[in-house]
Image (spheres, rainbow, N blue to C red):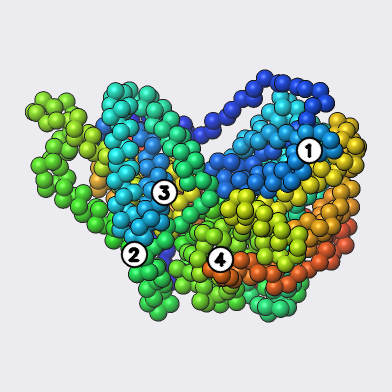
């Protein structure tokens, strides 16, 4: 009897979905931006960084774009694909937004894209990095202003083989699209440059205790490449150190492993971590210094790449809306304008889209260092104007399958 | 060899953490028949209160104590104001405790924000013991020690004291216990508070190694339920063995068959339920 109640209770942990309110549609009123992101749950801090960036960008424009007022409608998608789809429907059907943005996880990006195409409402992807959305299954109405998961990994893999001279690397990465793609890009260029990935471990998203994985790491490797996101970035370096690994195997990884949003909560265990990304709060340019200073004054913390990309997304929308004279209702023209935007002086550096719709931008190799008591991702090398295909020919590159758990295969495992 | 030793140690230490959580849940179950969905929230809020305490005072033991006491008080309030009235109505209790879990989740988000934190642990507890090629993080050893101490104390109280006898009597047959003059209602209250207390201790201790972050409440809750289902409701021994089993299964499952890690956790649970529907040590 009690057991059955228990089962009912266990099932009861599942979803609570909100229904959308009645439509209230005003003609030619403000430009409505529909934002969705994880505002609750394990990735809520990231969602907040994203929204802060967007709002700061809009505030600098006085909440006016091309002579029209701007309104932002915020929805919480809990970082889940099913909820994200419900919120998308709400934003488009009842709020009648003219442009969409937000979203965090790569698998949410894959889930949203076909529906966005169906609605024919442009959606900016400042963060969701799922490779294929600007590669093999490109979505017409998705405008990626962020990056592809494997974009920083490509130059980084070769750099690790040639500059750090590591021969054998073990990868530990979150087991979902983003993790596969970040690791895949790294493995491809690292092995082409003479390195060997000798073991690939895949803890599931949301793993709290990494001990079972850490104990398996091959001790004869030269380094460990880790890809963590959100709260796992907080736990991993500490558990890595406590397992006695930090002293033996240097820790490198994908950019999110040493996110700015998690650095203030980390200690010495993170120092020395090397990772590539499209942004670092420590980039030494006037545009970035001003951005970091003002963001800090406003929100009391250092901006992360989530803040930067959403801040730049606000500017992106504004540039495109200006180009069509504020007439964002002409969706085809607005979409075309969005694809043509070039921003030469974003905090992360110059950004423009390639022929496949993904930004060409700088990739920064960063090392975690302590400066004046705080942890920063010091830029130790910059690859300028890197495209999602890096040095590969797009047509050649697109013949290989999208990176996955088993591609590239682990030849040296 | 190294692999097995380390993985066993990891499993045991994770099981120890689960025991802190599931021990209270199991007793509350067994005694009051309350399916307490708020239990995960006690764990999370305990971690948050401990975090604030350590920021203010810098003392780790004080953080554990304050976190646990604050949550015990909250649990007591929830029980007295709401759950007591719903005695015997299982569905009502599930919904009420579920509602509280959602309220506490948002409350945590409002008060502590969405950023993940770790509770800074004292220097004596960080680092690891090294034996040859083997590393044992000191903090994990500490968790095992805390859980063992809690288990021994609970066992002594339950088996060797008058209060313990009264609690056991109430678990076995509340009506009869009331009949022989045991104040079942205050005992229930005390046990509920104790359960919340232990969950919060678990939350603060866990905060030192997995962190305190929104969502931790619903992440840990299914594990606690599995422990209680496997071990049997209301049995301390069951909670202890169940925790160790779940810790070890989870750990070895992830290490040996990573693709099947949920299967290796839930399949034995299903098997145990098929053979012993009341759990290993539960009574019908």
Give the chain letter at badge 3: B
Q: Is residue B59 left or right of residue A216?
A: left
Q: Determine the CA span between mark 3 and mark 4.
A: 23 Å
Mark 3 and mark 1: Cα distance apart in space: 40 Å
Q: Is residue A399 left or right of residue A130?
A: right
Instruction: Report in which chain the residue with disc 4 lies.
Output: A
Across and down, in percent, residue B122 comes to 37, 65
Q: Residues within 10 Å of mark 4 (few under 14, many from 20)?
A: few
Q: Which mark, by number, is residue B141?
A: 2
Classify mark 2: helix, strand or loop.
helix
Residue A41 x, y percent position in the rendering: 54, 43
The Cα atoms of the two marked residues, 1 and 2, are separated by 58 Å
Q: Chain of mark 1?
A: A
- Per the image, the residue denoted by label 4 is A374
Residue appearing at x 39%, y 63% in the figure: B121
- Residue A200 higher or lower than A87, as above or below: below
* Percent position of residue A246, x then y: 52, 73
* Camera-side mark, 1 or 2: 1
Earlier-in-chain disc, 3 versus 2: 3
Q: Badge 2 sits on which subunit? A: B
Report the front residue among A198 and A335. Answer: A335
On whether disc 4 and disc 1 are found on a single subunit, the reply is yes
| Residue under numbered circle 3 | B48
């Amino acid at each position: 009897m009690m057991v059955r109640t228990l089962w009912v209770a266990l099932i009861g942990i599942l979803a609570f979905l909100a229904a959308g309110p009645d439509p209230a549609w005003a003609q030619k009123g403000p430009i409505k931006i529909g934002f969705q992101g994880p505002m609750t749950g394990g990735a809520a801090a990231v969602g907040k960084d994203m929204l802060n960036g967007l709002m700061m960008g809009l505030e600098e424009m006085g909440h006016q774009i091309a002579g029209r007022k701007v309104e932002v409608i915020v929805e919480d998608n809990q970082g889940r694909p099913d909820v994200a789809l419900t919120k998308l429907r709400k934003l488009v059907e009842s709020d009648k937004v003219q442009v969409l943005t937000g979203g965090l996880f790569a698998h949410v990006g894959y889930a949203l894209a076909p529906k966005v195409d169906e609605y024919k409402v442009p959606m900016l992807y400042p963060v969701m990095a799922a490779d294929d959305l600007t590669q093999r299954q490109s979505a017409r109405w998705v405008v990626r202003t962020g990056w592809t998961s494997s974009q920083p990994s490509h130059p980084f893999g070769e750099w690790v083989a040639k500059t750090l001279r590591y021969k054998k690397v073990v990868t530990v990465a979150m087991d979902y699209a983003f993790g596969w793609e970040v690791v895949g890009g790294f493995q491809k260029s690292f092995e082409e440059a003479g390195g060997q990935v000798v073991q690939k471990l895949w803890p599931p998203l949301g793993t709290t205790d990494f001990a079972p994985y850490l104990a398996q790491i091959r001790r004869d490797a030269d380094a460990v490449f880790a890809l963590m996101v959100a709260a796992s970035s907080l736990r991993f370096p500490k558990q890595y150190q406590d397992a006695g690994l930090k002293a033996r195997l240097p820790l490198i990884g994908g950019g999110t492993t040493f996110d700015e949003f998690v650095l203030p909560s980390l200690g010495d265990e993170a120092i020395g971590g090397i990772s590539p990304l499209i942004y670092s709060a420590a980039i030494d340019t006037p545009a970035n210094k001003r951005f970091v200073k003002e963001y800090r004054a406003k929100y009391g913390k250092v901006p992360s790449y989530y803040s930067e990309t959403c801040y730049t997304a606000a500017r992106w929308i504004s540039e495109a809306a200006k180009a069509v004279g504020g007439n964002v209702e002409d969706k085809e023209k607005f979409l075309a304008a969005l694809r043509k935007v070039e921003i030469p002086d974003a905090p992360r550096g110059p950004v423009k889209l390639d022929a496949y719709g993904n930004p060409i931008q700088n990739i920064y190799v960063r090392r975690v260092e302590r400066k004046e008591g705080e942890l920063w991702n010091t830029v130790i090398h910059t690859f300028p104007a890197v495209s999602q295909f890096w040095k590969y020919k797009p047509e050649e590159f697109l013949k290989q399958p999208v990176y996955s758990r088993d591609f590239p295969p682990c030849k040296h495992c | 060899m190294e692999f097995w030793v380390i993985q066993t140690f990891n499993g045991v230490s994770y099981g120890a953490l689960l025991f802190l959580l599931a021990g209270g849940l199991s007793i509350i179950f067994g005694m009051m028949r309350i399916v307490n969905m708020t239990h995960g929230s006690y764990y999370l809020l305990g971690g948050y209160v401990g975090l604030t305490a350590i920021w203010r005072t810098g003392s780790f033991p004080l953080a554990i104590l304050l976190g646990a006491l604050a949550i015990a008080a909250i649990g007591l309030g929830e029980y007295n104001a709401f759950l007591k009235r719903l005695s015997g109505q299982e569905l009502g209790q599930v919904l009420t405790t579920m509602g509280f879990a959602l309220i506490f989740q948002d409350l945590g988000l409002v008060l502590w924000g969405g950023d993940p934190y770790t509770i800074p642990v004292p220097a004596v507890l960080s680092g690891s013991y090294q034996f040859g090629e083997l590393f044992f993080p000191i903090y994990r050893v500490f968790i095992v020690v805390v859980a063992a101490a809690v288990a021994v104390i609970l066992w002594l109280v339950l088996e060797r004291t008058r209060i313990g006898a009264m609690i056991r009597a109430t678990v076995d047959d509340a009506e009869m216990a009331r009949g022989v003059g045991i104040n079942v209602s205050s005992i229930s209250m005390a046990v509920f508070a104790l359960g919340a207390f232990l969950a919060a201790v678990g939350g603060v201790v866990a905060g030192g190694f997995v962190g305190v972050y929104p969502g931790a409440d619903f992440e840990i809750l299914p594990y606690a339920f599995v422990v209680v289902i496997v071990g049997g409701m209301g049995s301390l021994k069951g909670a202890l063995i169940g925790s160790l089993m779940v810790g070890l299964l989870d750990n070895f499952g992830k290490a040996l068959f990573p693709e099947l890690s949920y299967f290796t956790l839930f399949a034995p649970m299903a098997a145990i339920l098929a053979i012993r529907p009341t759990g290993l040590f539960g009574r019908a």
